Amino acid sequence: MPRPTKIAASPPAGVEEALERLGRRIRTARLRRRLPQAELAARMGVSRFVVADVERGKPTTGIAVYLGALWALGLLGQMREVADPDRDEEGKALERAHSPRRAHRRGALSDDF
């Protein structure tokens, strides 16, 4: 079995909290649909132990499994807004700061067609 990456073995607090929150939300969605873990697992094509890992927010569980759970619950469409470049205000500000202030001229203009 491969060793977990450093971020998975010891995630920053914010990452750990986000995974746990996502896991709780997936569990809540499953319970509201009255689905046993085994049935959700069957829809996803994984074992119920993997679903339990997702619901605990286990950092070594692959993102495809988390997305698979959202898909199986009909919630995958909500992922469209995650990391949307149009909502990345910091990235847009940095892009504007590094863009040229004016257009560059490449030689003299000619009226000769």
Image: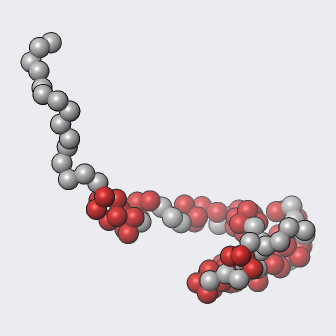
When asked about the image quadrant of residue 14, the answer is bottom right
Position above or below: 80 against 7: above
Whether residue 74 sits left or right of residue 79 in the image: it is right
Instruction: Please tell me which residue is depicted at 28% across the width and 62% down the height of the picture.
Output: 97
Position above or below: 37 against 88: below
Does residue 54 show up?
no
Instruction: Please tell me which residue is depicted at 89% across the width and 76% down the height of the picture.
Output: 49
Position above or below: 42 against 32: above
How many numbered discs sit on the rendered protein? 0
Whether residue 68 sits left or right of residue 91 in the image: it is right
Instruction: Please tell me which residue is depicted at 40% across the width and 60% down the height of the picture.
Output: 86
Q: For the view shown, which residue lies furthest in the left direction?
A: 111
Does residue 77 show up?
yes
Whether residue 7 sits left or right of residue 49 in the image: it is left
Q: Nearer the viewer, residue 20 or 110?
A: 110
Instruction: Please tell me which residue is depicted at 12% across the width and 28% down the height of the picture.
Output: 108
Q: For the view shown, which residue lies furthest in the front direction?
A: 107
Quadrant (top left, top right, bottom left, bottom right) of the C terminus: top left
Quadrant (top left, top right, bottom left, bottom right) of the N terminus: bottom right
